[in-house]
Amino acid sequence: MSHSFPKLHNALWPGVVGKGDGPDQEPPLSLDTMLNLTAAAQRGGKKFDGVDLFLFLPHTDPSASEEDLRRMADDIQGRGLSVGSLVAPVWPGTVGDSAMGDAASRKAFLSAIETACRIGSALSAHGVRRRGVIRVDSAEFGVDKWRSDPRGNTKKIAETFQEAARIAAGHGERLAAEGEICWAGMHSWKDMLDLLEAVAMPDSFGFQADLAHTYLFLLGYNAPEHALLSEGYDDEEFYAAYEQMVAKLRPWTIDIHIAQNDGNVFGAGSHDKTGKHCRADDPNGKLDIVRCASYWLQGAADRGIEHICWDGCMFPNAVLQNPQTWDAILDVMIQVQDNCGWD
């Protein structure tokens, strides 16, 4: 059955994350290239409704003027697309710095939130941005430093996130933290839950669930003490563990990434190793995407979720530039919408 919601968005940061000019990196794909690929995809007469944006170069200049942002918004809208969630440039080397760093680092992190809110407000005022949140993480690669003082470092991250959430709320925005095994303090389902409960601001700070990353939560890749599955599991064991994990994190979930994972860990360039995103039709994919998405989407409308977004982060450029990649992605997104959607 066809539904109006959730709207179907494509993430544009796969053209940037893990790309660069290093010896092990491919060149980034421009904003225009990613927009063109998104707008061209179709399946059964349906197309993507919108895109989620990465707020850093080479896609979006964090210091872009209001005129520049209006021009970008016109370009996106002219392709029949809207804008949803935004990725704040919170990492060292961008606008921000570590949320568990010293006072200067944490101040830079908060500056990145201000930047994202300014851009979000401009896009909303234009009319191209109709839905979505601002995505953050702890901006602390790896977990070794965090492990030196887990309780103290989680407290520090939580305090930074609380201040960030207050800034966002002042702009009418909500923040969503993406749990991923490479981010300190967010690298397992239990540590992510502890952090969310420490922030304790559910109206303005929640969780962004990514199917590929949360799959590795189950296996306890960077936190074996929190593993819910062992290698060699069967379907019954998988879904029992999946339901247990989702039940803990779903009440906090305000943004959802649809994705596939082949069970491997991958990193490129400066991006530390994390869950490997795969094509929607990858024969080695571990997830029944539609069934797994249904667990996260229970009660989604009540939590203010209006769209879902495909994340194919760190796909090779040859895969990203193949139109068949996006047609297959759109096909599975439509299946999720038909299975879990609402009007």
Image: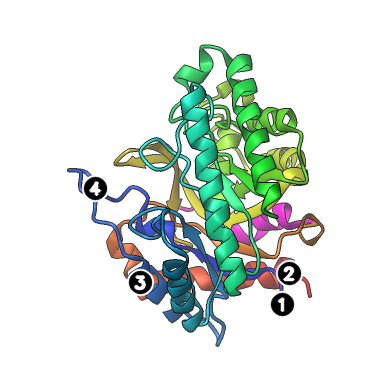
Q: Residue at x 70, y 55 (%)?
A: 172
Q: Kindly report the distance in space between the C-alpha atoms of the residues bearing marks 4 and 2.
A: 38 Å
- How far across and how far down the image is residue 224, in percent? 56, 23
Q: Nearer the viewer, mark 1 or mark 3?
A: 3
Quadrant of the rendered structure where residue 157 is?
A: top right
Q: Earlier in the sequence, mark 1 or mark 3?
A: 1
Q: Magenta segment range?
A: 285-298
Q: Secondary structure at mark 1?
A: loop
Amino acid under disc 2: Gly
Which residue is farthest left?
23
Q: Is residue 96 left or right of residue 287?
A: left
Q: CA distance from mark 1 to mark 4?
A: 39 Å
Question: What numbered label is drawn on residue 126?
Answer: none
- Mark 4 or mark 1, which is nearer the start of the sequence? 1
Q: Are marks 3 and 4 in contact (CB under 8 Å)?
A: no
- Alpha carbon separation for disc pair 1 and 3: 27 Å
Residue hosting label 4: 25
Considering the numbered disc 2 on the image, is that residue within a helix, a strand or a loop?
A: loop
Main SS class of the magenta portion in the image: helix
Specify the label residue 4 is tagged with: 1
Task: Please report the residue visible at 82 percent of the width from the left and 58 percent of the height from the top.
Answer: 302
What residue appears at the point 59 percent right and 52 percent down from the top-left corner? 134
Query: Left or right: where does residue 309 sit relative to residue 142?
Result: right
- Measured as percent of width and height from the top left, residue 186 is found at 58, 32
In primary-sequence order, the first of circles 2 and 1 is 1
Q: Nearer the viewer, mark 2 or mark 3?
A: 3
User: Which residue is situated farthest in the top direction here?
Assistant: 148
Instruction: Tell me the amino acid under the disc marked 4.
Output: Gln
User: Which amino acid, by three-letter code, is at mark 1?
Assistant: Ser
